[in-house]
């Protein structure tokens, strides 16, 4: 049984004042299927990169008796056939195959079980839902989901290797997520960062939670952890209310003690004789000690509130319209470079509709959204002349070195800027973070910043392209609750089935062409 030991480890990014981790000590068993959860910016990806060695702690140490590999894995080799790419990622097997006449190379190849590796790869293909003909295709022509699966196979076939998975299901369709969940469920141990609750339930048996003030590890899947967490939240909420009352009461006592301990106060009460002055000084010392005791009591009680997560309610305004019908699409077809991307697509969008656009990767979902947001004039599309769009892209793009504040202010009214800052606070993006360059943000923080901007715009149709990628689970709950309450006019693409079913009022299924 191998373990990863983290001993008194601290880490701070140079661009930030506050540390990401402070004096963290953990022992992680490599037989665990460990899910790492926490709010955006808490350090989930940072923790994986520290374990992998891509980042170094400022103090403390990380020791491990097993090799680790971080995913997403970037392949940079010269080979392009998928079978060769997988072999090369496993251990330079394809390079070794070009020099098997050398006895030393042959010995190394045999130690890596090279002659049996192709059979192992084919076995793993079936387990992860890929067909054998993928092996002879150019790796760079595979879909994103196929590339993800091929690289996962390679990493899990590496000897004595513990895999660190950072959001492996991002951008994958529902079928792809289910296939990877089934594949991981059969593996012995790994660490995974994911915000997909259903996926975590299917794959993990331990949870590492990066909380507001500490890190905890519990046995069980995500749902088990969530039930326990909710019970703790209820207890902490009651505790917070009681402690807040106690703290106010203690602060009142401290103020009274301070008044009585003030020498000038004693003069008001005409304590002028030597004997009475000495008595006053003695009482003053007692009052001072009592005040210090009360202060320490307040400090101790405030510590109990440090891990309480304030759940802020998301609310936003969408411009209302008088007209009911906003978009009509009938038998729309669209091609690019002689490739058909959409064929015979039909739907109607009315005021307050929440339309879920579904389909496998590559079926044209994002293409359709881009056509709509640009009001592209094509046969089969009718746009109401009053409509305006706000769109959240899959991967928000920011100008180089632009800060969060500059991004929110750029070419906007002061009222819109103020509203976007308010939304950032709801999304747990601090004013300190807003003053930093956007390229220092986590992926989830970048997406929250962009969403805060578009939700503060006075447009009457919102388009969200995979809004939950990189987003923490608390944000998911905020967004779902807000959409259900506000009922905006919305078109969205999302592979999280539970989220989609909770908010959608209408559905559009696109097919592969």
Image (cartoon, grey):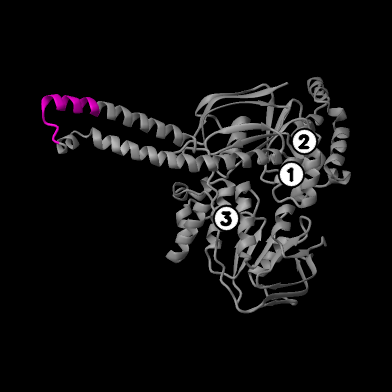
Q: Quadrant of residue 74?
A: top right
The residue mark sitting in front, 3 or 1, is: 1
Residue range corresponding to the magenta coloring: 270-284
Label 3 sits on a secondary structure element that is loop
Q: Is residue 231 left or right of residue 289?
A: right
Q: Quadrant of the C terminus?
A: bottom right
Left or right placement of residue 313 versus residue 336 in this view: left
Q: Quadrant of the N terminus?
A: top right
The residue lying toward the viewer, choosing from 379 and 492, is 492
Q: Earlier in the sequence, mark 2 or mark 3?
A: 2
Could you say whether the residue bearing mark 2 is in a helix, strand or loop?
A: helix
Q: Position of residue 156 (x, y in %)?
A: 77, 33
**Pointer 1 residue:** 199
Residue 275 part of the magenta segment: yes
- Along the horizontal axis of the image, is 507 left or right of 56? right
Kindly identify which residue carries mark 3.
397
- Label 2 neighbourhood size at 10 Å, few (<14), some (14-19), many (20+)? many
The residue under the point 60% across, 53% down is 478
Measuring from the top left, give residue 140's x and y in whole percent.
75, 48
As for residue 296 lying within the magenta part, the answer is no
SS class, disc 1: helix
Precedes in sequence: disc 1 or disc 2 = 2
Q: Give the Cα distance between marks 1 and 2.
A: 21 Å
Q: CA distance from mark 2 to mark 3?
A: 31 Å
> Can the viewer see residue 16 in this picture?
no
Residue beneath disc 2 = 154
Residue 403 percent across, percent down from the top left: 47, 52
Q: Nearer the viewer, mark 1 or mark 2?
A: 1
What distance separates the C-alpha of mark 3 from that of mark 1?
28 Å
The answer to whether mark 3 and mark 1 are in CB contact below 8 A is: no
């Amino acid at each position: 049984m191998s373990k990863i030991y983290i001993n008194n480890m601290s880490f701070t990014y140079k661009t930030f004042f506050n540390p990401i981790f402070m004096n963290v000590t953990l022992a992680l068993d490599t037989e665990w299927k460990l899910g790492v959860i926490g709010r955006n910016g808490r350090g989930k990806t940072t923790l994986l990169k520290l374990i992998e060695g891509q980042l170094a702690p400022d103090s403390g140490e990380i020791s491990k008796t097993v090799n680790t590999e971080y995913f997403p894995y970037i392949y940079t080799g010269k080979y392009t056939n998928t079978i060769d790419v997988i072999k090369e990622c496993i251990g330079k097997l394809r390079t070794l195959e070009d020099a098997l006449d050398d006895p030393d190379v042959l010995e190394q190849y045999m130690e890596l079980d090279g002659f049996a590796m192709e059979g192992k790869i084919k076995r793993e293909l079936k387990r992860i839902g890929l067909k054998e003909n993928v092996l002879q295709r150019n790796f760079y022509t595979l879909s994103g989901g196929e590339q993800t699966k091929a690289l996962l196979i390679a990493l899990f076939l590496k000897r004595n290797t513990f895999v660190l998975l950072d959001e492996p299901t991002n951008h994958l369709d529902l079928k792809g997520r289910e296939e990877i969940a089934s594949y991981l469920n059969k593996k012995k141990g790994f660490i995974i960062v994911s915000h997909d609750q259903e996926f975590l339930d299917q794959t993990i048996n331990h949870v590492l939670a990066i909380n507001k003030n500490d890190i905890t590890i519990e046995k069980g899947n995500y749902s088990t952890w969530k039930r326990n967490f909710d019970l703790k939240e209820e207890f902490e909420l009651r505790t917070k209310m009681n402690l807040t009352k106690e703290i106010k009461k203690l602060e009142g006592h401290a103020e009274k003690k301070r008044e009585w301990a003030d020498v000038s106060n004693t003069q008001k009460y005409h304590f002028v004789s030597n004997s009475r002055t000495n008595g006053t000084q003695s009482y003053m010392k007692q009052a001072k000690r009592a005040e210090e005791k009360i202060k320490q009591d307040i400090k101790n009680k405030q510590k109990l509130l440090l891990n309480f997560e304030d759940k802020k309610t998301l609310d936003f305004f969408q411009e209302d319209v008088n007209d009911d019908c906003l978009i009509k699409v009938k038998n729309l077809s669209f091609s690019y470079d002689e490739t058909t991307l959409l064929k015979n697509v039909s739907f109607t969008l009315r005021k307050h509709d929440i339309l879920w656009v579904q389909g496998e990767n590559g079926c044209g979902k994002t293409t359709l959204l881009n056509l709509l947001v640009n009001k592209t004039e094509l046969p089969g599309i009718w746009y109401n002349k009053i409509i305006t769009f706000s769109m959240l892209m899959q991967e928000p793009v920011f100008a180089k070195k632009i800060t969060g504040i500059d991004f929110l202010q750029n070419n906007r009214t002061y009222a819109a800027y103020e509203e976007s800052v308010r939304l950032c606070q709801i999304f747990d993006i601090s004013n300190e973070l807003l003053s930093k360059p956007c390229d220092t943000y986590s992926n989830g923080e970048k997406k929250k910043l962009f969403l805060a901007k578009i939700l503060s715009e006075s447009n009457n149709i919102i388009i969200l392209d995979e809004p939950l990628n990189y987003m923490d689970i608390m944000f998911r709950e905020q967004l779902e609750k807000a959409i259900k309450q506000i009922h905006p006019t919305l078109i969205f693409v999302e592979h999280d089935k539970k989220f989609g079913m909770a908010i959608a009022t209408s559905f559009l299924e696109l097919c592969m062409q």
